Amino acid sequence: MTDAQGPDNAQGRRWFTAANALSLLRIAATPFSLAAVLDGQWRLAGWIFVAAVASDFLDGIIARWRRTVSPLGGILDHTADAVFVTVTLWGIAYAEVDAGIDVVPGILPWFIALAFLQYLLDSKALAGQPLRTSRLGRANGIAYYVIAGTVIGRNALGIDWLPDEAIYWAALLVLVSTLASMFDRLRALAASRDEG
């Protein structure tokens, strides 16, 4: 019989927090977001998107309020964001190609995934180190949600308030910004190795 207060149980309690549950729900919502986008069910995609944004907003607040902030929670939160926006934007790009339009460049989701992987590895987050964010990386993370939300919202509401070209150029700008962020991280990593 194991002690209910043993180290394994304490470790489990650190994993199972309300904030981490919200992040996991965002990951769980990802295939439903993809299916809704690919099926053209934009209102459903809109509701899923709103729930994902709300969970992203609330998980950090809850973690701080309940004093359950941890490196694992940070990794889980950022992973949930990356998975949700990457897959949702990929679905949007794929659906657009199928429809013969081009609003989100198909290469953008791939570079979001690469940038996130670089971020995880560069931060040594998998070894339990805290994540090292940058202003540009944070801005890019918000921009990914804005691009996805703009396309989903526009289609869900049936309002052509923004031309396809404007969204496309904004998405290209975000792609360039993502590449700049990746280059900046590589440069900083090289500089830190030269110093060490």
Image (cartoon, rainbow, N blue to C red):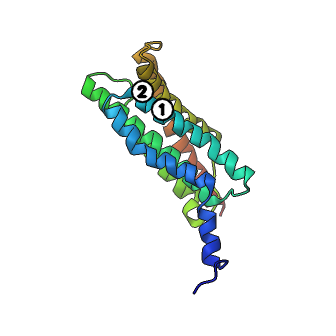
Q: Position of residue 71 (x, y in %)?
A: 63, 59
Q: Is residue 15 above or below residue 31?
A: below
Q: Is residue 135 above or below residue 64?
A: above
Residue type marked 2: Arg
At 46% across and 43% down in the image, what residue appears?
84
Quadrant in the picture for residue 167: top left
Amino acid tagged 1: Trp
Residue 145, position as x, y percentages in the image = 52, 34
Q: Is residue 95 above or below residue 121?
A: above
Pointers 1 and 2 in contact (C-beta within 8 Å): yes
Q: Residue at x 31, y 27 (%)?
A: 96
Q: Which mark is residue 47?
A: 1
Q: Quadrant of the N terminus?
A: bottom right
Residue 114 in view here: no
8 sits to left or right of 90: right
Query: Would residue 196 be seen by someone viewing this image from the given angle?
Result: yes
